[in-house]
Amino acid sequence: MELSLKKPLLFFDIESTGLNIASDSIVELSFVKIKPCEDGSNETVIKTWRLCPWDYEHNCQKKMDPGAEKVHGISDADVAGCPKFQDVVSEIGSFMADSDLAGFNSAKFDLPMLAEEFERVRTYCHKNFKMDLHDKKMVDVQNIFHQREPRNLKAAHIFYCGCDFEGAHGAEADTVATYEVLKGQLDRYPYDKETNPDGLQNDMEWLAQYSTGARKTVDYAGRIVLNANDEPIISFGKHKGKTVREVFNTEISYFDWIAKGEFTLDTKRQFARLREEYAAQAKAADEEAKKKPASEDALKDLMGKFNSGKLF
């Protein structure tokens, strides 16, 4: 079954120096862009970048973790002469600009890693760079697969597509395979309002909610989550379970601790954004209160101080 799209859907996969989102970097990034056409068909555009992982603080190439190299086969020498992420960030941003996102296990790893690379560029290179992945819908094909048939990408391709695929653990091969698996899932679990209401709906908003919407997070690392009332809640440490607003009102220094701590740049940015938002709201409320006439009790209190000669 072909995808029903209102806008382009961008499948993506990354290979990295390791699994630590805060300290590791992307060495290969592949996109498979599915663009809806006027005749109802879809056009496929594939773009892959091999990247030199860069340590912005020490101005040097990051080293590959041996375990990561064993999985994807990319060595330090393979990427030494490649462009840095900052060198192609505008090209990557343009390719992603009009698209929703899809991937295999991307909501937990690839998406946070990609967001971290954008944050590094914004922090160290181009402070006015505009790209916020939080604004995009995300379809995680692995989560659909695990809810229906809990296995890995290779097994998913065999199960849904009827065959194995060459080049597993290469970003491009994995990305193309993920696209084929999602189409196979739609074929295997077709939705029909009357006969099969529990099937998969061929709608990107529905699939994004089904595959990634169970736990609502503000930052990709899940340090801030949303409760039933969509209030930002801290999910770790001494303030676990408290609203971010409550901590803002009682311990403003906590936000400084987050800014200086070993958290992802995305987590730091979300805490900083909420701090600015709450500060602006408090200032607006204070200014509004000053505009209101004094209450009768306040006037009586002021008059008593005036008559006693003790205004201060």
Image (cartoon, helix red, strand yellow):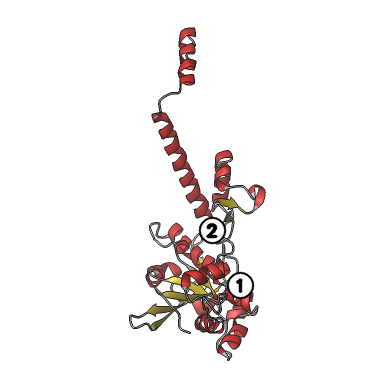
User: Badge 2 is on which residue?
Assistant: 219
Q: Position of residue 7 (x, y in %)?
A: 39, 73
Badge 1 marks a residue whose secondary structure is: loop
Classify mark 2: residues with Cα within 10 Å, few (<14), some (14-19) or many (20+).
many
What residue is shown at x 50% (from left), y 46% (from top)? 275
- Residue at image x 44%, y 37%? 285
Determine which residue is flagged by label 1.
65
Q: Amino acid at mark 2?
A: Asp
Give the answer, above or below, for where 131 lies relative to 258: below
Which quadrant of the view contains residue 89?
A: bottom left
Q: Is residue 62 visible?
A: no
Picture residue at 42% right of the left edge, 38% below the top: 284
Find residue 144 and report its horizontal and vertical position in percent: 58, 75
Q: Residue at x 41, y 71 (%)?
A: 99
Residue flagged by tag 1: what amino acid is it?
Asp
Q: Is 225 placed above or below 195 here?
A: above
